[in-house]
Each structure stands twice: as C-alpha cells, then as structure tokens.
Image (spheres, rainbow, N blue to C red):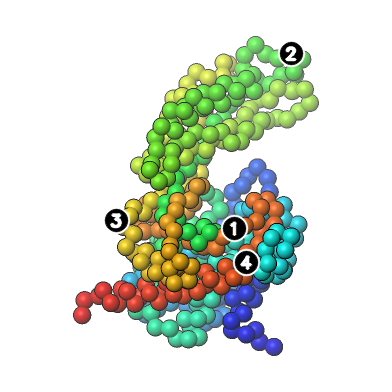
Amino acid sequence: MPVPPEEELVADLVALARVPSAVPLGADTLIEPDHPTLRHYVQECLRPMFRGLGADVIDLPRNQFAVRLGDGGGPCLALMAYTPTQHHNLMAEPWSGRIRTPTELGIDEPCVFGQGVTQNKAHQACLLDLARWIITERVPLRGTLLLCVNNEGRSSHDCSNAILDGLPQTPDLVVQLFPTGFDVSVGNRGRVDVLVDIQGTTAHSSAPPAQGRVIDAAADVVRRLGELDAVVRTRSHPELGHEQVVPYQVRYEPLAPHTLPATARITVDRRLLPGSDPDAATSEIRAALEGAGTGCEISVRPGVAMLPAYLPPERRAVLGPLAASIRTHLGEPRYTVYGGSFDAGGPASRGIPTVMFGVPEEGDLLGDDYVRLSAVRRQAAILRDTVTRFFEAERTQAPS
C-alpha cells in the first residue's frame, strides 16, 4: 500500500533513522568524509532517495552531493544538511527509528527516536520533502535552489569549501539546517584546537628524575593557560561573547604500571571572534608557555579550526523570506547566536550570508535522541514557504 503523500516526510525520516551515521566513540572525535559509515550512508541510502525522485544530482568531492532545482539562473539559495552524527552516543537503541509518545518525559505527542534525528536526519528528510514537492507539483522556481549534503565531521570547513567550489554558482544565502530550537542563528564564535606536546623523561615512579617529569610539566602548562585565559577573556563581542583558552583533553603515553609517562598532549579550546586569526592565537599560546616544564621539550601547533561567523543587522535583509515564513508558522522570528562553533564560518568567510535554523533538540547529550513529528512537519512547511518567498521576492525586485 503506497504511503500517503502527507506521511512521506515521516516515512523518509524513519528510514534514515534506521541507518548508522555516528562518529565512533573514543579519543579521536574526527571522522573523514569518506569513512565507510558515511560512504554507505550517503551513497547507498541518501543519494538513491533523491535520485528516486528524479532529482538532478550534482556529485561533489569528499563523498558529497547537491540537488539542483529551478531554472538554473537568477538568484541562488542553498540549504545544507550534514551527515556525521556526533552526540547521543550512549543511546540504548540508536538505530530503531521507533515512533512513540514519550509520556515519561512529559511529552504528549508522537516523536521519532534515533541517533542523529535532531542533528542530521530531520533536516535531510525536509530536503527530500522539498525536492519531492517541487518535482511532483512542478513548482516554478525562477532561480536556482541547491540542496546540499555535507559530510563535515573534522571540525573544519574543508567539506563546505569543496561544495562551494563545485557548485554551478555561488549562493546568495546559505541556510545550514541544524537544531537551533527554531531560532535563526546569525553568528557563532570560531575555534582552533591548539595542540601542546610535551616530551620528557620516563622512569619508574619509585625513582622519579629530578627534571623532565611530564606530569609536572603538564601542570605548569595548565596553570599558565589559566593565566592567559584571564587575559584573553577581556576580548569580547556584544553578541558572540568572549574569547577563551581552555584545555579540555590531556593524554599521557605510555600508560604503564608505576611508570612516569614520556609524553603528554594537551588539547586547548581556543575560541575566536571575528577578526581573530587562528595562527596568531596559537603563537600567543606558544609565547605564554615559553620556559614551562623544567627539563621537558614543549611544542605548540594549531590543529583543526573553524572560523567565527556573524551576520550583522544591516546585512539581514536577505533573511526576509525566512523571517516571513517563521512568522507565518511559528510567530515572531528570534535571532540568536550559537554557543559552540559550527560550519557557518566557512561560507561566511567567503562573503556569503550564512545562518543556521532548525528543529529543537530536547534529548540528553549522551542519552536518547528524539524529535517531535510536529516539529519536523513545521520545519518542512517553513522551508517550503521560504523557498517560495525567496524566489518570488527576487522576481518582484528584478528590473522589468
């Protein structure tokens, strides 16, 4: 029995929720775009679903693709959804795709359960809904709509840059679909992971060396980073907040019985504001650690980085169609900033207005991930309305 058209959105979401897409647990939280999990998810699951609609699929580097809709000219709107699932790692049944009403959580309406349904899969389902609607209803678009599937899972902008380099034209607006609680995120701080490597002397703990103790050196490094953090936090932005220097991971090697380790790596979260330079921020840390750790060799280098993003009020006219659609379906739009770092800084650094928007995320960070069906339907309706308004507005403003 064919699925009723109004339920195809839910059927797509359930199908996607049953396919693994998660970053493996462990100290290495980065995942390559052609990792077997993502390759299977993109090439064997998501891409065939778009092809099955008769969509014009543009294959792009890094195991990515975009769907092109419209007449191929005029204004260009890009909607972007992501594939790597990074949270809810301890969910009991991550790939069940179950629909149930979780009354134990105080929710009295149906939800889809599955790891990544809020971060990724609700948004992919909404892109499928858009493509199906435009193709089956022959919706005229005087311009170019690009539905982009992005595999960024390495805290960089490499995948977005590969997409933008491979698209037939540069978008006038990029909307990154992300769980923002239906707020429009107009900015976020950037971040560079600064890697501090310490080389010292290994020895049995019963006879520790006078110098070269890696754990002592690490303690000295952390103390100095705290002093630098107090200085760096005085640099702030009225909406985005302050810069910071926060060590968040320490790894020692070797871990052996009663043995002082020979090396340590401290990973530092260095938050950035517009105008901050990742290399300059790394050099500042290097200078602060000069002479630390008696008898140890200390090196400092930048790791993965994401740039800050900010769309100031004077440039937000391009958000008019999205704002009007939110106003129709939800009420007055709310503009906010995202507390973490995300990919908006990539397109924004190329001069493309970029914002984030999407369903609320209500589940526990490590526990169950679920999304209300009403929220998914609302997002799908807003995106349909936004696309219609975007191209109508551009046609109205075009010279006769």
Dot 2 corresponds to which residue?
Answer: 207
Q: CA distance from mark 4 to mark 1?
A: 9 Å
Dot 3 corresponds to which residue?
Answer: 314
At 55% across and 23% down in the image, what residue appears?
223
Q: Hey, which quadrant is residue 371 in on the image?
A: bottom right
Q: Earlier in the sequence, mark 3 or mark 4?
A: 3
User: Are dots 2 and 3 in contact, CB under 8 Å?
Assistant: no
For mark 1, give the secondary structure. loop
For residue 372, the mark is: 4
Q: Quadrant of the N terminus?
A: bottom right
Dot 1 corresponds to which residue?
Answer: 361
User: Are dots 4 and 2 in contact, CB under 8 Å?
Assistant: no
For residue 65, say whether it is visible. Answer: no
Q: Earlier in the sequence, mark 4 or mark 1?
A: 1
At 61% across and 47% down in the image, what residue appears?
29
Indicate the position of residue 14 as horizontal and vertical percent values.
66, 71
Q: Is residue 347 left or right of residue 48?
A: left
Tag 3: residue type? Glu
Q: CA distance from mark 2 to mark 3?
A: 65 Å
Residue furthest to the left: 400
For mark 2, give the secondary structure. loop
Indicate the position of residue 131 as horizontal and vertical percent values.
50, 77
Tag 4: residue type? Arg
Q: Earlier in the sequence, mark 2 or mark 1?
A: 2
Q: Marks 2 and 1: which is nearer the front?
A: 1
Residue density around tag 1, few if under 14, some if 14–19, many if 20 or more, within 10 Å: some
Tag 2: residue type? Ala
Q: CA distance from mark 3 to mark 4?
A: 34 Å
Tag 1: residue type? Glu
Q: Marks 2 and 3: which is nearer the front?
A: 3
